[in-house]
């Protein structure tokens, strides 16, 4: 998300530094980029803890003195702490669990899990680790290791997302989505309770005239809320925006899980299908050219050729250009989900798990 925009800003920033500081500035930037983005580092992990801790602190500081309120039971003081705690535990599990690191000792175990499909994966050695690359694995250049069923390297977790921690990662996204929705609704209910307890609507009605409808009073109520509870409103807006982002991330990763595809594989399939489409288009246009040359040579002998025939021939050529994604690892909704919950390499008898082929 936003890669293109980030890339543009990055290039502009880079040019600015080069212009102002010369090569010394860009060398320092190269070094900073190396330690910040190309090596494992905990900057984003610390940032996550600061955001979740800071937001919860703001809520406790600004809102807890209104709990229990008219619409909120006193137990929300404890359930909110519990919900944040579970979120942090999921974060720690994703960050510090083994994503499925492959080494010389366990490579044969991982090799037996997924067969090579010979489309996007074929038997190959990792040039860095000097071991066979099991199907669906990838060498993470940041962590400098091969990871089974590699999804992506997550900067927030400072860890790869692979075969053994995809479940924690997806649960992390889902839990934080619910956490943000919970926070938004809870603060909304606290503010609604304040309106009720302070009889704000009643007072504003009296002030602006009894004949005013709810619709004409609403802007005054909103204005009063913004004036009196600006911290809570800001936190609410922040949580609502983050919950929307998280719903998108969770939806994307859940759809990958149920189709048994990794983020890394979506790139591979894109490349493969793009290449296939080009080859087929070239083939189809060559055939079309040959057909039209044949038509031209036959025109002298057979001038009355059916237009329908030409039409159908053309449409048949267009159909040929269709390319298909044949994902042999997709074993159906429930099996795919079960594979995320209970990774194949963790099961004892690999031979009993046969994947559909071709
Ligand atoms: Zn490797
Ligand atoms: Zn990594």
Image: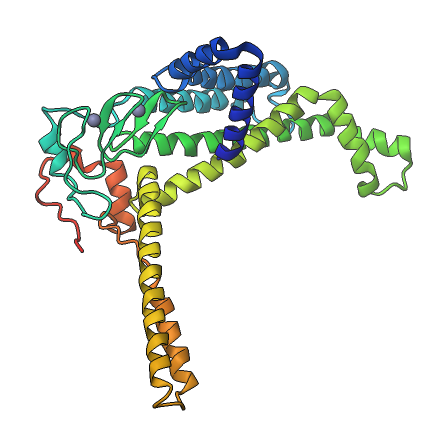
The image shows residue 266 at horizontal and vertical percentages of: 34, 43
311 in relation to 95, above or below: below
Instruction: Name the quadrant of the C terminus.
Output: bottom left
Please give left or right for residue 195 compared with residue 330 in the image: right
The image shows residue 242 at horizontal and vertical percentages of: 53, 30
Is 237 in front, or is 139?
139
Residue 209 found in image quarter? top right
Is 134 in front, or is 197?
134
Please give left or right for residue 210 compared with residue 140 in the image: right
Please give left or right for residue 4 compared with residue 351 in the image: right
Residue 148 found in image quarter? top left
Q: At 62% across and 29% down in the image, what residue appears?
A: 237
Residue 42 at least partly seen: no
The image shows residue 263 at horizontal and vertical percentages of: 34, 38
Q: At 34% across and 17% down in the image, what residue appears?
A: 39
Q: At 36% across and 90% down in the image, what residue appears?
A: 302
Residue 130 found in image quarter? top left
The colour mode here is rainbow
Residue 291 at least partly seen: yes
Q: At 11% across and 24% down in the image, what residue appears?
A: 104
The image shows residue 277 at horizontal and vertical percentages of: 34, 56
Looking at the rendered structure, the number of numbered marks drawn on it comes to 0
Is 207 in front, or is 262?
262
Assign ligand 1 to one image quadrant: top left
């Amino acid at each position: 998300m936003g890669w293109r925009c980030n890339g543009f800003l990055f290039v502009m920033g880079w040019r600015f530094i080069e212009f102002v500081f010369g090569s010394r500035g860009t060398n320092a930037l190269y070094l900073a980029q190396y330690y910040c983005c190309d090596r494992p580092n905990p900057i984003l992990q610390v940032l996550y803890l600061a955001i979740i801790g800071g937001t919860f602190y703001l809520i406790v500081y600004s809102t807890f003195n209104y709990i229990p309120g008219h619409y909120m039971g006193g137990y929300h003081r404890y359930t909110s702490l519990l919900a944040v705690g579970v979120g942090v535990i999921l974060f720690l599990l994703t960050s510090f669990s083994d994503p499925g690191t492959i080494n010389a000792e366990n490579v044969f175990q991982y090799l037996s899990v997924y067969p090579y499909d010979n489309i996007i994966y074929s038997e190959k050695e990792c040039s860095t680790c000097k071991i066979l690359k099991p199907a669906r694995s990838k060498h993470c250049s940041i962590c400098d290791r091969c990871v089974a069923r590699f999804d992506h390297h997550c900067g927030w977790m400072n860890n790869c997302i692979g075969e053994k921690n995809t479940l924690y990662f997806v649960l992390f996204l889902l839990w934080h989505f619910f956490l943000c929705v919970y926070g938004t609704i809870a603060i909304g209910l606290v503010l609604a309770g304040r309106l009720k307890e302070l009889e704000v609507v009643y007072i504003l009605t009296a002030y602006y005239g009894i004949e005013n409808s709810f619709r004409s009073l609403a802007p005054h109520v909103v204005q009063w809320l913004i004036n009196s509870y600006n911290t809570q409103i800001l936190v609410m807006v922040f949580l609502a925006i983050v919950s929307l982002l998280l719903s998108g991330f969770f939806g994307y990763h859940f759809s990958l899980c149920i189709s048994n595809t990794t983020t890394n594989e979506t790139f591979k399939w894109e490349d493969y299908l793009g290449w296939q489409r080009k080859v087929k288009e070239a083939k189809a246009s060559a055939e079309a050219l040959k057909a039209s040359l044949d038509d031209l040579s036959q025109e002298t002998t057979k001038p009355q050729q059916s237009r329908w025939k030409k039409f159908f021939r053309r449409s048949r050529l267009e159909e040929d250009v269709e390319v298909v994604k044949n994902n042999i690892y997709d074993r159906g909704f429930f099996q795919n989900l079960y594979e995320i919950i209970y990774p194949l390499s963790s099961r004892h008898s690999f031979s009993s798990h046969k994947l559909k082929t071709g």
